Image (cartoon, coloured by chain):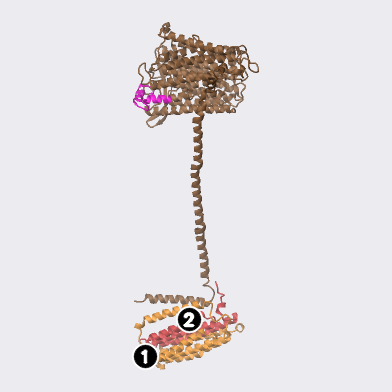
Chain colours: A red, B orange, C brown
Amino acid sequence: MVGSTPLGGFLLVAALLFSIGLAGALTRRNAILVLIGIELMLNAANLNLIAFWRYGPHPELLTGMMFAIFSIAVAAAEAAVGLGLVISIYRHAHTTDLDAMNRMKG
Amino acid sequence: MSFVFWMFAVLTVAGALAAVLLKNTVHCALALTVAFAGLALLFLDLDAQFAGFAQILVYIGAVAILVVFAILLTRGSETPKDGVFSKNWFVGLVIAAGVFAVFAWAVLASVGVLPHEAATPEVSVAQIGQVLIGRYVLPLEIVALLLTAALIGAVIVAMDEKERAR
Amino acid sequence: MQGSISFTPQLAASPIAEILWLIPALPIVAAGLAALLKQPRRRTAATLAIGAMSVSLLLSLVALAHVVGAWTQGLAARETVNFAWIHAGATSVDLGWVLDPLSAAMLAMVSLVGLLIFIYSVGYMEHDENFTRFFCFLSLFAGAMLAVVIANSLLLLFMGWELVGLTSYLLIGFWYQKPAAAAAAKKAFLTTRVGDVFFLLGIVWLFAQSGTLLFYNYGAGSMETVALTALLAQPAAFGLTAAGAIGLLIFAGAAGKSGQFPLHVWLPDAMEGPTPVSALIHAATMVAAGVYLVARVYPLMQAGSLAGGTTTALTVVTRVGAFTAVFAALIAVAQNDIKRILAYSTVSQLGYMMAGLGMGGVAVGMFHLITHAFFKALLFMGAGSVIHGCHEEQDIRKMGGLKADMPLTFITYAVGMLALCGFPLFFSGFWSKDGILEAAQHWSVARAPFYMLVFGALLTAFYMTRQVAYVFFGHWRGGKPAHESPAVMTLPLVVLAFFAMALGLIGTPAWPWFRAFLDGRVAEFSLHGFAEPGLLILMGTSTVVVFLGLGLGWKLYSGDGPAPEDADVLEKSVPLVWRWLHDRLYVDELYGVTVIAFYGWWARVADWLDRRVWGGLVAGVAWAFGQFAQLNRFFDNNWVNGGFDKGCEELVSGGGLLARVQNGRVQTYLRILALAVVALVAILIWSSRP
């Protein structure tokens, strides 16, 4: 089914997803939305991996797939820790607004 | 490009855009879920069934829920006064656009060398399992450790301090 | 008789010639010491001066005796002692002194007359509070004059000359609080300066042409044959040779010092000084220095003349001298100040001396110089005695009948006056003046000087009689009665009166000792001297002239003179002529409208130049500097300050800008990270393209 789509298409989609995720991470005020953006970036990378696995020379080695699976696992762990941090920060500053968090200024 | 691919791609991108642009944070989380789903479909389209299902299970089933939990715990559903975007949001947009431009340029410049078609690989779950235990056993164990540490860490970090002191 | 004097040079100088330099040195040292004294120490000052002068006189007499002795033994010698003063490579500037008959005679005269006047001054200046300063200057003058006399180098002579001029200025202006005295001193200095400029030109030219300024230097001197021939060969301007031109330049200097027309204007004004000064400087010695100078450079002036002929230089000397003689005598007729009459008389007699030199040679002129020194000093000192006795009155119209009140003064003054007039036989003036008249009679160029000099003799007798009649005869027309002067003043008068008569003996045609002495010959007493053709007639003529003058004067002025307010007898008869003569023939006024007016104009031009042009230049430069400074300030304020300060500010704001990166917000850091990664990736991709 997929044979007619060139690899470049998948890569472009991945790039687009990555950029959107980055845009979100860089522009939104809420810390959680920054994490959402990061998740999108990770997913875009996964897509890239799977696409290159599929169109690569030796798909039977499953290298790409393994990479993607491990990436998913790590992403999950990271999301948990990150959100835990956000909650902890929320407890201190009573807000998740990143613009207000400039104690590290200077 | 096939119609299916287009559909899945549009779905994913739309979800992603919504996730980033919407005002209500909960709506953003839900849009993120849609994006995840789209991605899972794309994985399936790429004959990576295990990855696709793993995506659904982990991302949609765990990460998205987690995000919603976090939103609710931090009263993120309330719309802030000054708008949802940070002060210099345009700069961020420009940078992201620049990033996209670079990637697109790289991809488009190498269109000639990228393969158009590929044969469907013969991949079974048994094979995946064997590879996991075989070749990738070390990363597997390390990921297990990682997950444990993340679990404990996240709990500690998110715990109420009074409880921690106790 | 003109003769070039040639002596055989002696190789070793005699002892007296070796120490000849002491003669001027001692008075100068005395002057230096006197300068250090405080004013009240009068006796010390007078002792120093008179003591030094006495020693100088002694040495001068020794020198004279030596020269006379050497001459009578047939060793007619001119001794010189020369030494190099400045060495300039191969050439050197030499100084030296000479002992020959001319200098010996002059030395004796100057030191004797000087000493007598010093003694006289002790009495005359007794009431003056600046007694010490007076003797200091007087001694300095005497030393300088003696230096002029012994000089063998034109440079040494010039140095003494200048010093004499300086001391003359100091002494004329001795009572400097009087504006008239200060002005007279300045006038004397400036007028003689005019002559000195030409003199200096002559000296420089002579040095350039002949390479030496020494007069006699064993054949190498400038007055000796080698140098003179060279100078004659050089043509100068106006048809003159170098010898003639230099001679005329030197004469210009002499004319200034000796008061010849037109540089005579300072001498009458110089009477502002004390009478001893007038006697010493302006009668006997300094004014005679000019005549002495011409006598010294006579070989130069005479060079190129054929036997019996004359040169251009000497002709000029004669003409100027003759003119001055008559000019001054005319003015003397109409003066009323006792010293002014004598001053103009001096100018006139100096003219006689110059004419004598020009026509008759060194001996003729010098004889009159020596006799004139004695009787003129006598006359001045007598006038001083009169002034002193009349309580500082100087106008002859306010005197009279003094022959009874001041007998000694009267007798000595009469001797002097008769000598000046040239009263026959017993008075030296007759013989010396006749010498000049004889030379004039035989002058080859023209007869005009002879007639002028005879007329001058007439005028001399006339004005002197007028003066004597006014002062000593008639009755007293002044205020307080007069009194005789003390012995310290009258004794020198007696001595001088003696010489005024006795000196005639050495100049008679029967025994022309002086002339022979200067020529280096032996003179024999022989009455055949009177047998020269025309001599007796000349003597008779001059006698007649003298008696004519005396008689005319006596006739007009004897008896009671007019009251001071009345006009003079002559004034009543020829008022216009009298006016002209009384106003000194307007020479001073002429100078006033020409030279002085020009000088004033020139000073104004120079002042304008200085203020506008040079001052403007300086102001312009200053303004330019100011503008430059403004430009600098502009640059400094705007560019340097602005630039530098701006730069610093930019730096600070840049720092501020950069600091904004560290705003503590995570998303900012993220953005920068992303940017950096993008840039890196772009570079990587771009650099890895084939």
User: Where C631 sits versus C8, above or below?
Assistant: below
Q: Which type of secondary structure does the marked residue at label 2 adopt?
A: helix
Estimate how packed mark 2 is, as few (under 14), some (14 to 19) or many (20 or more) residues with alpha carbons within 10 Å: many
Q: Nearer the viewer, residue C597 or C431?
A: C597
Query: Which quarter of the picture shows residue C73?
Result: top left
Q: Residue at x 40, y 8 (%)?
A: C533
Residue C61 in view (yes/no): no
Range shown magenta: C221-250
Estimate how packed mark 1 is, as few (under 14), some (14 to 19) or many (20 or more) residues with alpha carbons within 10 Å: some
Outermost residue on the right side: it is C480
Q: Which residue is mark 1?
A: A3
Q: Which residue is mark 2?
A: A22
User: Where C465 sits versus A74, above or below?
Assistant: above
Q: Residue at x 51, y 29 (%)?
A: C592
Q: Residue C680 location, x and y as percent?
A: 42, 75
Q: Is residue B128 found inside the magenta-colored segment of the image? A: no
Marked residue chain, label 1: A
Q: Residue C587 location, x and y as percent?
A: 50, 25
Q: Nearer the viewer, residue B27 or A68?
A: B27
Outermost residue on the top side: it is C527
Q: Main secondary structure of the magenta part?
A: helix
Between disc 1 and disc 2, whose residue precedes?
Answer: 1
CA distance separating discs 1 and 2: 30 Å
Type of the residue with mark 2: Leu
